[in-house]
Image (cartoon, coloured by chain):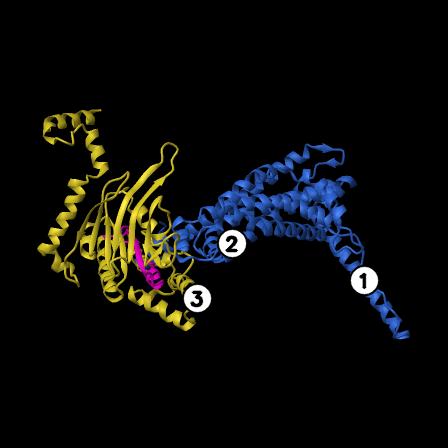
Chain colours: A blue, B yellow
Amino acid sequence: MSAGEHTAPSSDALAGVAGTRFNWEKHVNRLLQVIGLPLIGIAVFLMIWQMGAASIQTSLGQFPGPAQVWDQAGTLVQEHIREREKAGEFYERQEVRNAKKLEKNPDASIKWRDYTGKSTFFDQIFTSLYTVAVGFILASLIAIPVGIACGLNESFYRACNPIIQVFKPVSPLAWLPLVTMVVSAVYTSEDPLFDKSFLNSAFTVALCCLWPTLINTTVGVSSVDKDLVNVSRVMALPTLTHIRRIVLPSAIPMIFTGLRLSLATGWMVLIAAEMLAQNPGLGKFIWDEFQNGSSNSLGRIMVAVVVIGLTGFALDKLMLILQKRVSWDKHATLR
Amino acid sequence: MQENYLDISGVGIEFPTDEAPFRALQDINLKISRGEFISLIGHSGCGKSTLLNIVAGLENATEGGVILEGKEVDEPGPDRAVVFQHHALMPWLTVYENVELAVRQVFKGKKNRAEMREWIEHNLRLVHMEHAVGKLPAEISGGMKQRVGIARCLAMQPKVLLMDEPFGALDALTRAHLQDSLMDIQAEVGNTVIMITHDVDEAVLLSDRIVMMTNGPAATIGEVLKIELERPRDRLALAEDAGFNHHRQQVLNFLYAKQKNPETLKQEAALGVAQESPALATPRATENKLSSEQAA
């Protein structure tokens, strides 16, 4: 204790000072743990990356370090803003032109053309998100009902199990050619609502998203508390009420575990599918940059890698939030 | 009283195993009158729960059958409501909703919304749970959960109320409270009840008849004891009552002398005590055995 503190007028004040200082220390410790340690981890990673990158020479120049990647991220944002401005100007010109036409002749037929500039990095993120959402929702709409049926009915499960086990480990790349050919053959319309490349990617994602949800739903449904099942039988609940009031609430945690695994798988599969199907999403962005082969390409791909990671992380958090809203057990710790 | 309200005749059940089929129950015959309170008592594993499940329709007897009010039982239904040992409330439904789920199913088209509401509240009042209608099962105590479980069954207006060790998981004080509640409800509603219990005092206090079962495999009814005690019964007064203690003695005698617990028998055999002639095993020999085991 310092001399200054000895001259404090009352012992109460001293205790107060000591008390606040103690709490403050605890607070700092906690802050260090929650924010400090992850920051240290990131800093160490960036350092290793920087050092490693400096010693790798590729045919496209030096492997990009964190600084170059940061620069490229800025460029991509700039490109996006410029593209949007161009689009804005295009639409403005079009409106002026149309207005003039109408002034001259009110009955004139006016054409409305969409801007067809190249899609920017952010458009491509959006395309990827949209594609994965369609594939994932399609898969869930099939996997959850089938999973419930498998969980409720032992015979049905035995019948389905071999098919599930065989198709589960199949890589998306094996599916893609088949999906492409089937879509080309079946989806023939003059004015298609969706691009074929979009459908190919979405279906491939769906085929890979099916299995984790299906398997986890089956397990969740078949492990409903036996007492609760017996109560339901004693009450003679009809099958649909039984599923809605007893099976689904019990199985929600397992179903969501499956959904989260599916979404993570789907997101990974999507990038590969987009590369090959040429769906204008992040996968195509990476492929195009690779083919482009400018000195900035590797940096731009690295930006995409980081964005893919962050998006996957965000998607998982989104599912957690959804699970919290749907689940009846608000106190369960979800991770 | 209607003699043959519930007729269990010639019931036996076998469970398939990898080797020979396991025969759990054999030749069970029991006739129960309307409004009668029956306790099933016996050592663990003697098939009490299996018998109750057969009456509930949750399990199918291999031979024989159960006839309730002239109709054979072949599937579970709300006319044979079951109170489970571990309450079996849906954890995602409130107290009210748990009872409502049953009431909606049973009285669909027979009661309107207001009548259902009144009926649910009436049954929750019967078990003294009207104060917790909006609570989730996780927010109330074990005894309260069991009360709600009972209310749910009463609300189904069953012909027979089946109770599988309803108070087995509760502490002694809570159990006594619930037994008193159950007696009050019985006095008011007059249900036909079959209750499994391990508690001799509980059986004597609540029952009109106690059905004592022999040890399995191939367990059957050993003795049926009629309890001739005036109702309403008061646990404090009965504690000193000669009749009560006599009945109690009879049950204990059946359980611990005539039908020794199979677990105890095994332990005795392991200790080298000849169960038929305990005099042959000298205390010294037993002591030696014990001390050598301790040393090892």
Determine the chain carrying the residue at label 2.
A
Alpha carbon distance from label 2 to label 1: 44 Å
Nearer-the-camera pick, B288 or A37: B288
Q: Which amino acid does label 2 sit on?
A: Gln
Residue shown at the point (42%, 60%) measured from the top left: B93
Label 2 Cα neighbours within 10 Å, binned few <14 / some 14-19 / many ≥20:
many
- The image position of residue B58, as x and y in percent, is 38, 50
Residue B93 visible in image: yes
Q: Marks 1 and 3: in contact by CB < 8 Å?
A: no
Determine the chain carrying the residue at label 3.
B
Relative to B79, A327 lies left or right: right
Nearer-the-camera pick, A212 or B58: B58
Alpha carbon distance from label 3 to label 1: 65 Å
Q: Taking A7 as reference, is A284 above or below it? A: above
- What's the magenta region? B148-171
Q: Which amino acid does label 1 sit on?
A: Glu
Q: Mark 2 points at which residue?
A: A323
Relative to B283, A23 lies left or right: right
Q: Residue A294 carries which label?
A: none
Q: Does the magenta stretch include residue B150?
A: yes
Taking the view exactly as shown, the residue that stands out farthest to the front is B70
Q: Mark 1 points at which residue?
A: A89
Secondary element under disc 1, as helix, strand or loop, is: helix
Q: Which mark is residue B108?
A: 3
Label 3 Cα neighbours within 10 Å, binned few <14 / some 14-19 / many ≥20:
few
Residue A8 visible in image: no
Kindly indicate whether the residues beneath marks 2 and 3 are on one polypeptide chain. Answer: no
- The image position of residue A129, as x and y in percent, is 66, 51
- The image position of residue B289, as x and y in percent, is 16, 26
Mark 2 or 1, nearer chain start: 1
Alpha carbon distance from label 2 to label 3: 33 Å
